């Protein structure tokens, strides 16, 4: 196992090393030693990911501080950093935390929800990163780099088996095609049965199949030019996102509405790792893309980089109504996304007095979604509407957003003295968004009374927003001062401003009453201050990095839930403050042993949010207010305390065999489960322990490796995210239970 911080331990087979090796990162769009970059970051090597079996986006929060991944399914997934960015299911809005794959910005977090295999390195950059990265990001960036083609023949074959029907196979092959051209291909297929039992028919849900292929070519005729082409395709057919009942909500005048209406429709409620669903629960995801990155070394050591990319993403769900009776046959939102991006960068040679990076960026995205609800014969009883209003009615809506984003950027560093550097960055982004939101007239249903007809139109009536437009200019700024106190110690301070454009609600929500402009939300603006130190001590055997931060966000973009229409909607949630302390450390005390620990204390809450949705215990009361004041409340999904640690010990036997032991511990404290901060939707804190042991040795021209692993060793029951449900209930997605498995691999 390799460290989760900025220095990597020796590669497999070199356990005799007693020092940590430097890690190179691209945080400032040029290759640099991570310990010399004045930015708060954490780095995971590909070897660390493999050793800890962190192969999904939602696993990363077990290894990185200040990180939360709210995951229900690939569409309803979000990445938040320092408590900022919890916006699942927001088709009409980019995330506050950006995800980049091989220097390509991913317009949807779901584009990264596939098995993350053959990864070279992951960098988590915390705080606004808009001056150098393609899209403005107010919370931070997850930068993923995959392994490149090699001019030396190499490959690997890996097979894993585990409980709950878990089977994962992967293979990688790379080598030269001629003196100047190398290729690489990576393939994988994963399957698991799931771990939630459907009491209705005995099936197991929460699992399914994922598979994909990734091909690359690297053309390198000389040391001054390289051209890298990447093409990939991934698909998923699963029941991911199956929600279990977390809480039935409050008692109002001695009555629990959720239980009362469940009894009225004849539903039987279950909780824990059980559901009771009479309809299908499934998702299908198809996605892929291609990119072309060219790097030229120009005269005087200038570096010119061009990155062209196109990606597509197709998500189709089939969701039950969470009951074992026919309230709804199917409900959900499908999404179709295409994006194209082009980036040009020029990096100056590293100089004695001044060096810089400047460039231009273009991003185009076409997003379409379909909102559908197929009501059953019990819909009115469940929803409390006039009989006949919704029974057997079909409601279908469509939304689209066409985005064009243009940006220019520059960042330079003045070397004021041999010990003191000053960096200044600026970016200007202009964006145009054009959108439409429509809903068809309700279909089906029986002729009804005037009251029921009015209720039908209110919930599912025809609507057309017409053409909606948004135009915005978003500046980003960075000023950073770094002091090389010694060769082993770097101190830094920075001020940053980041902005991201507004978004569009692609569901009708309250637009028929409030008007089409209510579908639009405004920009999000963040000001950030950082103070940090990076140290490499004990002859490069100990690394300790720490930083303080204070971020204030205006017009914070959030995803809320309207109890009346039972729909999620985007909104500007006022002003948010995030402040805290982060720590990263790695220690190699003796030969073969590496210890890592990281953690964060993060206090993130609304300074002002006086038009928030009310929690169920308020919203279900007679005469309940239209909104509540959440000023002073904690932001959804943000644990105040996070601590992660891992240890790896490997040694050599006389016959050339190499045994090893790995262990990790990840703990996070309580978090608010839903935006309304209901006391019935509070995520308890939890701790996870993962263990593994293995043996490797040489065989022919390669190395074999067999390991036994145990994830969630103490079988902790925990929820990764919570969700509002009708009639005051709250549901959630359960984390993976204890899973025992083994992996065999051969690298050559």
Image (cartoon, rainbow, N blue to C red):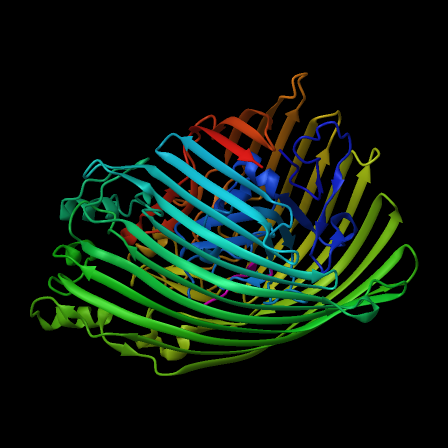
Residue 275: tell me if it is visible.
Answer: yes
Where residue 340 appears, x then y in whole percent?
51, 71
Give the residue furthest to the front.
Answer: 178
Name the residue furthest top.
654
Q: Quadrant of the N terminus?
A: top right
Q: Nearer the viewer, residue 669 or 192?
A: 192
Position of residue 253 measured from the top left corner of the image (x, y, whole percent): 26, 47
- Tell me the residue at 38%/29% (across/down): 163
Residue 676: quadrant of the picture: bottom left
182 with respect to 481 (left or right): left
Where does residue 555 sit, x and y in percent of width and height? 54, 67
The quarter in which the C terminus is drawn is: top right
136 relative to 489, above or below: below
Q: Please give left or right for residue 190 compared with residue 473 in the image.
A: left
Magenta span contains residue 100: yes
Residue 699 image offset from top left, x and y in percent = 58, 27
Image: 370 above or below 551: below
Q: Identify the magenta region.
A: 92-103
Within the image, what quadrant is residue 428 found in?
bottom right
Q: Residue at x 45, y 52 (%)?
A: 213
């Amino acid at each position: 196992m390799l460290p989760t911080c900025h220095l990597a331990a020796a590669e497999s087979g070199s356990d005799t090393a007693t020092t940590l090796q430097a890690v190179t990162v691209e945080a400032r769009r040029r290759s640099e030693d991570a310990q010399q970059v004045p930015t708060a970051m954490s780095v995971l090597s590909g070897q660390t990911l493999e050793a800890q079996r962190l192969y999904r986006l939602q696993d990363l929060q077990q290894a990185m501080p200040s990180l939360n991944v709210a995951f229900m399914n690939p569409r309803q997934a979000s990445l938040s950093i320092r408590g900022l960015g919890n916006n699942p299911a927001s088709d009409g809005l980019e995330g506050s935390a950006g995800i980049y794959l091989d220097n390509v910005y991913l317009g949807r977090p779901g584009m990264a929800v596939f098995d993350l295999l053959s990864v070279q390195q992951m960098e988590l950059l915390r705080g606004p990163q808009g001056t150098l990265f393609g899209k403005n990001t107010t919370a931070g960036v997850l930068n993923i780099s995959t392994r490149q083609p090699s001019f030396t023949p190499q490959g690997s074959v890996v097979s894993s088996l585990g409980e709950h029907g878990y089977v994962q196979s992967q293979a990688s092959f790379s080598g030269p095609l001629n003196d100047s051209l190398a290729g690489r291909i990576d393939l994988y297929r994963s399957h698991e049965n799931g771990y939630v039992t459907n009491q209705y028919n005995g099936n197991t849900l929460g699992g399914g199949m994922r598979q994909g292929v990734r091909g690359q070519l690297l053309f390198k005729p000389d040391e001054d030019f390289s051209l890298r082409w990447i093409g990939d395709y991934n698909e998923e057919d699963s029941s991911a996102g199956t929600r279990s009942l977390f809480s039935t909500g409050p008692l109002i005048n001695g009555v629990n509405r959720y239980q009362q209406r469940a009894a009225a429709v004849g539903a039987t409620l279950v909780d824990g790792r059980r559901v009771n669903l009479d309809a299908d629960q499934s998702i299908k995801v198809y996605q892929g893309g291609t990119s072309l990155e060219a790097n030229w070394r120009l005269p005087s050591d200038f570096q010119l980089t061009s990155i062209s990319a196109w990606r597509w993403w197709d998500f189709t769900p089939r969701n039950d109504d969470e009951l074992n009776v026919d309230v709804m046959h199917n409900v959900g939102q499908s999404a179709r996304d295409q994006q194209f991006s082009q980036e040009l960068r020029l990096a100056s040679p590293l100089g004695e007095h001044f060096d810089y990076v400047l460039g231009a960026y273009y991003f185009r995205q076409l997003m379409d979604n379909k909102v559908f609800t197929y009501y059953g014969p019990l819909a009115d009883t469940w929803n409390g509407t006039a009989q006949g209003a919704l029974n057997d009615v079909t409601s279908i809506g469509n939304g689209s957003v066409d985005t064009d984003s243009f940006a220019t950027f520059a960042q330079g560093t003045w070397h004021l003295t041999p010990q003191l550097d000053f960096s200044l960055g600026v970016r200007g982004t202009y964006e145009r968004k054009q959108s439409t939101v429509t809903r068809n007239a309700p279909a089906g249903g029986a002729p009804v009374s005037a009251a029921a007809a009015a209720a039908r139109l209110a919930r599912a009536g025809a609507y057309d927003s017409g053409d909606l437009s948004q135009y915005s200019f978003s500046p980003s700024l960075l000023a950073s001062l770094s002091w090389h106190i010694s060769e082993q110690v770097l101190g830094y301070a920075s001020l940053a401003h980041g902005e991201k454009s507004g978004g569009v609600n692609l569901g009708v929500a309250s637009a028929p009453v409030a008007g089409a402009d209510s579908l639009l939300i405004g920009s999000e603006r963040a000001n950030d201050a950082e103070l940090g130190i990076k140290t490499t001590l004990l002859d490069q055997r100990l690394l300790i990095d720490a930083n303080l931060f204070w971020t204030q966000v205006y017009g914070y973009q959030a995803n809320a839930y309207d109890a009346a229409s039972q729909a999620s909607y985007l909104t500007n949630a006022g002003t948010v403050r995030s402040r805290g302390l982060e720590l990263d450390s790695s220690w190699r005390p003796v030969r073969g042993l590496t210890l890592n620990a990281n953690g964060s204390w993060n206090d993130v809450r609304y300074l002002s949010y006086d038009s928030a949705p009310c929690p169920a215990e308020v919203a279900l009361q007679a005469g309940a207010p239209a909104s509540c004041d959440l000023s002073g409340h904690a932001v959804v999904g943000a644990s105040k305390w996070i601590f992660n640690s891992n240890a790896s010990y490997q040694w050599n036997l006389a016959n050339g065999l190499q045994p090893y032991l790995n262990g990790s511990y990840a703990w996070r404290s309580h978090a608010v489960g839903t935006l309304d901060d209901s006391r019935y939707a509070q995520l308890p804190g939890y701790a996870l322990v993962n263990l593994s042991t293995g043996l490797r040795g040489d065989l022919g021209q390669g190395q074999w490796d067999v390991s036994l692993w145990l994830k969630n060793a103490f079988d902790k029951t925990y929820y990764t995210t919570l969700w509002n449900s009708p009639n005051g209930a709250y549901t959630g997605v359960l984390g993976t239970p204890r899973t025992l498995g083994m992996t065999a691999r051969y690298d050559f």
